[in-house]
Image (cartoon, rainbow, N blue to C red):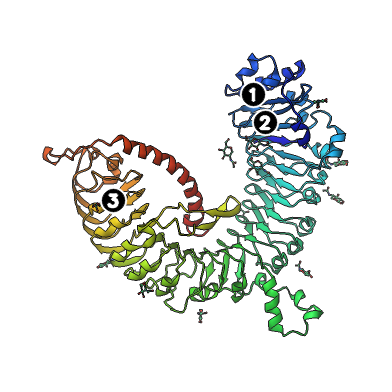
Amino acid sequence: MAFFVLPLVLLLSMASPATSCNKQEKTSLLQFLAELSHEDGVTVPWRDSMDCCEWEGVTCNASGAVIEVSLTSRSLEGTISPSLGKLTGLLCLNLSYNSLSGGLPSELMSSGEFPSTVWENTRNLGVINASNNSFQEWIPSSFCISSSSFFEVLDLSYNQFSGSTPPGIDNCSALRVLKAGHNNLSGSLPDELFNATSLQYLSFPDNSLHGLLDGAHLMKLKNLVNLDLGGSTLNDKIPNSIGQLKRLEELHLDNNNMTGELLSALSNCTYIITIDLKNNNFSGELQKSELFQPAQSKSIGSSIQQLNWHNSRNHLFMQLLAYLIALWLSGNNLHGQLSLRISNLKSLIFLSIGDNKFTNITNILHILKNCKSLTTLFIGANFKGEAMPEDEMIDGFQNLRALSISECSLSGKIPLWLSKLKTLEMFLQRNQLSGPIPAWIKNLTSLFHLDLSYNNLAGEIPIALMEMPMLTTDLTANHSVFELLVYLGHSFQYQIISTSPKTLDLSHNNFTGAIPQEIGQLKLLAKLNFSFNSLSREIPKQLGNLTNLQVLDLSSNHLTGAIPLAQNNLHFLSKFNVSHNDLEGPIPSVGQVSTFPSSSFDGDPKLCGIMVAKLCGLAEAPPVSVPSTEKMIKRVSFVIAFGALFGVGVLYDRIVLSRYFG
Ligand SMILES: *[C@@H]1O[C@H](CO)[C@@H](O)[C@H](O)[C@H]1NC(C)=O
Ligand SMILES: *[C@@H]1O[C@H](CO)[C@@H](O)[C@H](O)[C@H]1NC(C)=O
Ligand SMILES: *[C@@H]1O[C@H](CO)[C@@H](O)[C@H](O)[C@H]1NC(C)=O
Ligand SMILES: *[C@@H]1O[C@H](CO)[C@@H](O)[C@H](O)[C@H]1NC(C)=O
Ligand SMILES: *[C@@H]1O[C@H](CO)[C@@H](O)[C@H](O)[C@H]1NC(C)=O
Ligand SMILES: *[C@@H]1O[C@H](CO)[C@@H](O)[C@H](O)[C@H]1NC(C)=O
Ligand SMILES: *[C@@H]1O[C@H](CO)[C@@H](O)[C@H](O)[C@H]1NC(C)=O
Ligand SMILES: *[C@@H]1O[C@H](CO)[C@@H](O)[C@H](O)[C@H]1NC(C)=O
Ligand SMILES: *[C@@H]1O[C@H](CO)[C@@H](O)[C@H](O)[C@H]1NC(C)=O
Ligand SMILES: *[C@@H]1O[C@H](CO)[C@@H](O)[C@H](O)[C@H]1NC(C)=O
Ligand SMILES: *[C@@H]1O[C@H](CO)[C@@H](O)[C@H](O)[C@H]1NC(C)=O
Ligand SMILES: *[C@@H]1O[C@H](CO)[C@@H](O)[C@H](O)[C@H]1NC(C)=O
């Protein structure tokens, strides 16, 4: 997107398109058009109509001067012609959502003489948003000299800028927002950047910056509210001076190569809401981490000297990190146990400490159960080889909605304390648990995503599982929607996921016996995976009643008999696998099941049909039915709905399902 919003909103409202444009401006516009390598035809009328003020996307003021050119989402390609600089009255140029490339012509920056009276009479607004294009060349280094007094927002993210940061940035004395994430920036952060001391929002995620974060420089940006330098190769420690950024609310230094222990200085950032340090090399013992200790200096204040040491420490701690909502520490080298003080983080909603070297899962659960706001907890890939705590005293977790304790090789059984987590909606648990699935599983009345895959669970699939309230009845209407702190790029926001797929995954276990006929009750289920078990007997025909199924995987079991799904309502099914069983008879040649490739049926030598290039005897021919028009319409609308769903699914997977670490 490239749009330069210049601060002349008042003038724009006086615009009237009724006058005809001047000849030179018309030439400039046609020149602009000529220099695009692709224009999508919307601009053809430009060549036909005499009056450029009537052209689509062009607005003139009452005396016929072009004041706005807005050609968004037009598939425009090529470079922006400097001829636009001749539109001396241009106030707004919006070329967002195109595929323009090259540089921003310097002529644009000096577009006309900015009428000084206007600057004097309007508030100091100045925005350049050139995000999401293919620009490679920086805007001219002089741009802040002419516009430094009003220039507040520069968004250059999602382009192909390389080298260091935009030159001349230190002269942008009013710059509040600087975003240049998702480019190819390299080198270390230039000193001059830290002279733009009005910056509140400094966001450079996903570049190739390296070097260290200089403490003396950083502390100059006293107005910083949001600092995002994630996704580069910054190394060394977080400087202590970060504690002087008193307004800091969000800190993203994730996916770098930073080291050291977590600093007490961070707890000086009183208003901090998010700390994202995941995927670095931070080390140390979180229990002893200074981050969760009150800064020494604070406890020595004379007014509190009389207080008992313990009380004052606790009291002070309550004020520290009091607003912290999200803490990502996954993918580091932290070890030891968790500090008891973490349970004082009363605002904490999202905690991800997965993929470290923490020990004593019992201790961690005991501590975190007291975090009253906690909704999302990812602690997987720690506690290697410990036992799942069976301790019945683990309660609390009043608001826990998503819990992942995967990939810890935990032994033991599915613990009884889980039955008390009435708010639990997602439970992800890949370990080495053994024993059966307990019947109380249906007591988890909010649970709609149950992943018990890759364990050693055994026994029959319990009927109780077919009575899970969230999978059998449409409770979504009166059930509070699932809000999850969704990680979007290098920021996060609350996302309401009421449409996330309802999942039952028992794959890679040792379940035996038949698939219960009661499975037909799980009417809301979207993903069903029973693969890699020892299930036997026939596939219940009731499966055909699970009309919301998108994924059905029964592969690698000992199922026998025919595929009973010739006539069914599985219109949403997009993945289907019954390979490596002992199934026999014809593969349905109509209906959704008939649309899957032969790999879905591999390793079932007794199956026949066109799909597996093996003719069936005539007597076995499947019944033929033609899908009604109504069904076809349903399928089309599903495709559209699925498109929308998929968007959510991707984000969802990214944080929760992609290795479960957050
Ligand atoms: C239209 O814009 C031109 C160029 O900025 C300016 O000279 C002229 O006064 C404007 N006319 C009106 C009616 O605002
Ligand atoms: C530019 O165009 C886009 C797409 O039409 C629109 O969303 C955006 O609000 C416009 N920007 C301005 C400043 O008018
Ligand atoms: C960039 O623009 C394209 C359309 O041109 C859009 O599909 C894509 O989502 C945009 N990316 C971002 C990060 O806004
Ligand atoms: C720039 O425009 C894009 C697309 O309209 C928008 O998402 C982004 O927030 C804008 N940047 C700023 C700093 O406002
Ligand atoms: C910043 O502005 C001063 C004059 O105000 C000028 O001398 C200097 O060259 C400018 N710096 C850059 C990098 O443009
Ligand atoms: C930053 O500003 C200080 C004084 O405000 C000045 O001494 C220094 O040269 C500036 N640094 C850069 C790189 O512009
Ligand atoms: C934390 O804040 C206190 C009190 O404002 C101050 O004395 C101390 O130096 C700060 N620590 C750091 C590391 O900034
Ligand atoms: C990360 O830091 C270590 C030293 O702390 C260094 O050996 C390594 O090369 C760095 N990796 C990258 C990708 O910069
Ligand atoms: C683990 O934590 C529990 C509960 O806090 C504690 O009783 C136990 O001693 C700890 N085990 C080890 C090995 O530290
Ligand atoms: C499950 O719910 C039933 C009925 O609501 C109750 O009798 C039973 O004690 C509960 N089981 C557990 C383990 O909470
Ligand atoms: C699966 O269960 C059977 C008996 O029910 C047992 O013989 C076998 O060892 C189990 N396999 C695994 C991998 O636990
Ligand atoms: C499917 O559900 C319908 C009603 O919802 C019921 O009449 C039918 O018997 C069910 N079929 C199977 C195979 O369970």
Q: Earlier in the sequence, mark 3 or mark 1?
A: 1
- Left or right, residue 232 beside residue 578: right
Q: Where is residue 591 in the image (x, y as percent from the top left)?
A: 27, 40
Q: Of the residues shown, which amino acid type is indicated by label 3?
A: Asn
- Check disc 1: other Cα within 10 Å, few if <14, some if 14-19, many if 20+: some
Q: Is mark 1 within 8 Å of ligand 2?
A: no
Q: Where is residue 424 in the image (x, y as percent from the top left)?
A: 46, 65
Residue, disc 2: 102
Name the secondary structure under disc 1: loop
Q: Of the residues shown, which amino acid type is indicated by label 1?
A: Glu
Q: Is mark 3 within 8 Å of ligand 12?
A: yes
Residue 638 is at least partly visible in this image: yes
Give the CA separation, mark 3 to mark 2.
56 Å
**Front residue of this view, candidates 61 and 81:** 61
- Left or right, residue 486 beside residue 60: left
**Front residue of this view, candidates 130 and 142:** 130
- Residue 545, label in figure: 3
- Left or right, residue 186 beside residue 549: right
Q: Where is residue 621 in the image (x, y as percent from the top left)?
A: 16, 39
Q: Of the residues shown, which amino acid type is indicated by label 2?
A: Gly
Q: Position of residue 347 (x, y in %)?
A: 61, 66
Give the CA separation, mark 1 to mark 2.
24 Å
Kindly identify the residue that appears in the image at 33 percent across and 63 percent down. 467
- Left or right, residue 333 beside residue 584: right
Residue, disc 1: 56
